Amino acid sequence: MGKTSVAVKEKYNKKAYEDVRLRVKKGQKEVIQARADALGKSLNGYVTDLIAEDLKNSAGNGEK
């Protein structure tokens, strides 16, 4: 029998992505999720887009 689609996805994700744990104060997750929803993004997409934008801006300012 072949691998299940879940197992295949997990194997791919483990190879292609790294996990970063983020902790926020109680109640903040809902606020962040609401903003992501308003922008039509997933929570992960919203956070990674913010990080990417900050990194792009910091590179242009000579920051490390």
Image: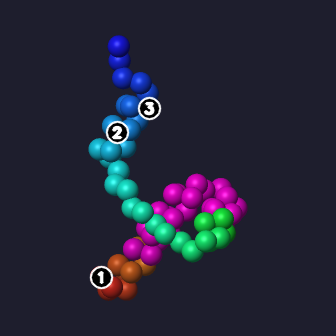
Q: Position of residue 60 (x, y in %)?
A: 37, 81
Q: CA distance from mark 3 to mark 1?
A: 39 Å
Position above or below: 60 against 17: below
| Disc 2: which residue | 12
SS under mark 3? helix
Q: CA distance from mark 2 to mark 3?
A: 10 Å
Quarter that holds the N terminus: top left
Could you tell whether 1 is left or right of 39 in the image? left
| Disc 1: which residue | 64
Residue found at the very far front of the displayed protein: 26
Disc number placed over residue 6 in the picture, else none: 3
Q: Main secondary structure of the magenta part?
A: helix
Could you tell whether 42 is left or right of 37 in the image? left
**Span colored in magenta:** 33-55
Q: Position of residue 55 (x, y in %)?
A: 39, 74
SS under mark 1? loop
Which residue: 38% across, 38% down? Answer: 10
